[in-house]
């Protein structure tokens, strides 16, 4: 299935010079959304995954259906100050600014085999920081999955783990 028609390019959002990949048309179409979730789940079936980690904000939309398709739990990585329990933090540089991410220190253990999910891979900074968090709490990251890889930005080279993407822009 060609998902390209379901991705809307929004120029200069949220800052001048950024072409934002708006995935809401895809989410609004059951066939396209199902196709994307199943593509990620199928590529990671039989790999012993025990947790799917999603990164706020749009990773929260994709990761839970993939987790349920794989029959495992979902773990959120959130922006600072949002998690209610004991959390650890990693800072990073974003395509448009600086930020940090946090994970509950008991949400992943050294017995967990983890698939990491976000909507878009741009510079790779967000995923790099998220992987560090999972490794700091003892988890084994066996792969990362994205709806979209903005491959021309080279984010994949920054990520020290296999990268799967449903769509790739070169
Ligand atoms: P990065 O850390 O540079 O790989 O940026 C990835 C994060 O920023 C993801 O969580 C994306 O949701 C968001 N992001 C970065 N660039 C874009 C873009 N051009 N369109 C949509 N989302 C983006």
Image (cartoon, rainbow, N blue to C red):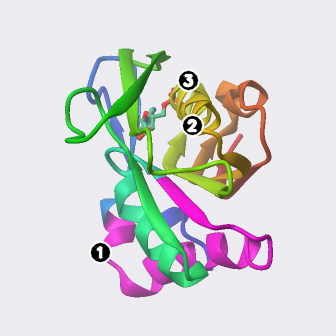
**Secondary structure beneath label 2:** loop
Q: Nearer the viewer, mark 2 or mark 3?
A: 2
**Secondary structure beneath label 1:** loop
Pointer 1: residues within 10 angstroms few (<14), some, or many (20+)? few
Q: Residue, x 55% and y 72% (percent of image)?
A: 36
- Going from the N terminus, do you reach mark 1 or mark 3 first? 1
Percent position of residue 62, x then y: 44, 64
Q: Which residues are magenta?
A: 25-53
Q: Which residue is mark 2?
A: 137
Report if residue 4 lies within the magenta region. Answer: no
Q: Which residue is mark 3?
A: 125
**Do labels 1 and 3 touch, CB within 8 Å?**
no
Query: Is residue 8 shown to the viewer in this render?
Result: no
Label 2 – label 3 distance at C-alpha: 19 Å
Percent position of residue 90, x then y: 46, 20
Pointer 3: residues within 10 angstroms few (<14), some, or many (20+)? many
Image quadrant where residue 165 sits: bottom right
Pointer 2: residues within 10 angstroms few (<14), some, or many (20+)? some
Q: Residue, x 56% and y 23% (percent of image)?
A: 125
């Amino acid at each position: 299935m060609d998902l390209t028609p379901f991705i809307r390019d929004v120029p200069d959002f949220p800052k001048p010079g950024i072409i934002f990949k708006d995935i809401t048309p895809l989410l609004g179409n059951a066939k396209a959304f199902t196709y994307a979730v199943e593509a990620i789940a199928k590529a990671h079936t039989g790999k012993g995954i025990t947790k799917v980690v999603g990164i706020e904000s749009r990773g929260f939309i994709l990761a839970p259906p993939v987790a349920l398709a794989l029959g495992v739990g979902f773990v959120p990585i959130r922006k600072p100050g949002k998690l209610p329990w004991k959390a650890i933090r990693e800072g990073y540089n974003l395509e448009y600014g600086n930020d940090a991410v946090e994970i509950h220190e008991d949400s992943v253990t050294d017995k967990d085999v983890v698939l990491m999910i976000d909507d878009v891979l741009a510079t790779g900074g967000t995923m790099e920081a998220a992987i560090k968090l999972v490794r700091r709490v003892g988890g084994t990251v066996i792969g990362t999955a994205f709806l979209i890889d903005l491959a021309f930005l080279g984010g994949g080279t920054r990520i020290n783990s296999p990268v799967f993407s449903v769509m790739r822009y070169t």
